[in-house]
């Protein structure tokens, strides 16, 4: 089957004809990507939406350098990369209209803190869009009904869980250890509501990826 690039899905979401949407393309809005990696999606969207200003946040030195090089090569003036260890999301009182993340939260040692930071950095009318693996609510259901479950659990054991367990618990931080198939609908909805988001819904599910929107109001 044809695989639809994440940038195509994200453009579809941003283009949606929703009068209450805080991220219409004609508005000069501020957009944050949490865990932007080398900047592929960030730069694709900045190219597509020249009137919006995009800020990527990343903690990998290699990814930050790669993203900086790609931004320079693109000659775009509406996209920036930040080292989240030095410039955390929401630093300098920057308030965003929209935040998004793609294939990140299940890898994060503390995804709940990332969600809480995102909520605090958004305007009251803002929204958070999350693209992650379309996991089912139990191992048994995944094995039975998810077409790629066995492969994904193998990948999770070698990569995603290692990332999710890469920091020692301390203070209020507790390892989530979600892994590749850990970002289920119950987990995501509970985490988003607990952070303060008032309305959470599944936007679409395609290519084993689920896109969820959380609105601040």
Image (cartoon, grey):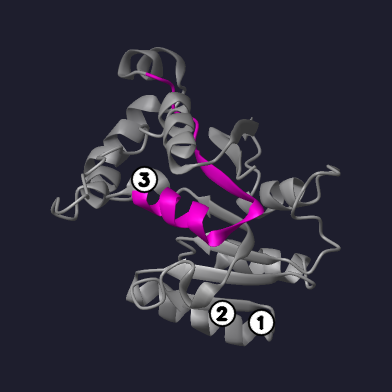
Q: Quadrant of the N terminus?
A: top right
Residue in the picture at 57% in, 78% down: 80
Q: Which residue is mark 3?
A: 112
Residue in the picture at 44% in, 22% down: 136
Q: Is residue 143 above or below residue 64?
A: above
Residue in the picture at 31% in, 19% down: 139
Under circle 1, the secondary element is helix
Q: Read off the magenta span.
A: 113-137
**Residue 153 spot, x, y in % from top left:** 30, 32
Marks 3 and 2, how far apart at CA: 30 Å
Q: Is 147 on the left-hand or right-hand side of 128? A: left
Q: Quadrant of the C terminus?
A: top right
Closer to us: 179 or 111 = 111
**Magenta span contains residue 194:** no
Q: Is residue 101 above or below residue 134?
A: below
Q: Is residue 107 above or below residue 41?
A: above
């Amino acid at each position: 089957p044809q695989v639809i690039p994440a940038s195509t899905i994200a453009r579809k979401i941003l283009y949606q004809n929703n009068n209450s949407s805080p991220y219409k393309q004609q508005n000069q809005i501020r957009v944050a990507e949490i865990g932007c990696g080398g900047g592929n999606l960030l730069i694709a969207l900045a190219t597509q939406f020249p009137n919006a200003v995009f800020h990527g946040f990343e903690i990998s030195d290699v990814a930050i350098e790669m993203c900086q090089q790609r931004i320079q090569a693109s000659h775009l003036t509406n996209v920036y990369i930040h080292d989240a260890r030095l410039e955390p999301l929401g630093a300098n009182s920057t308030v965003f209209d929209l935040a998004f993340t793609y294939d990140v939260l299940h890898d994060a040692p503390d995804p709940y803190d990332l969600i809480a930071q995102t909520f605090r950095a958004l305007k009251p009318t803002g929204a958070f869009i999350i693209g992650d693996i379309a996991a089912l609510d139990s191992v048994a259901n995944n094995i039975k009904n998810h077409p790629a479950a066995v492969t994904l659990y193998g990948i999770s054991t070698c990569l995603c869980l290692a990332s999710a367990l890469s920091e020692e618990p301390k203070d209020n931080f507790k390892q989530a250890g979600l892994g590749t198939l850990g970002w289920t609908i119950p987990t995501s909805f509970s985490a988003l509501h607990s952070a303060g988001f008032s309305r959470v819904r599944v936007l679409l599910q395609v290519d084993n990826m689920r896109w969820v929107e959380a609105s601040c109001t």
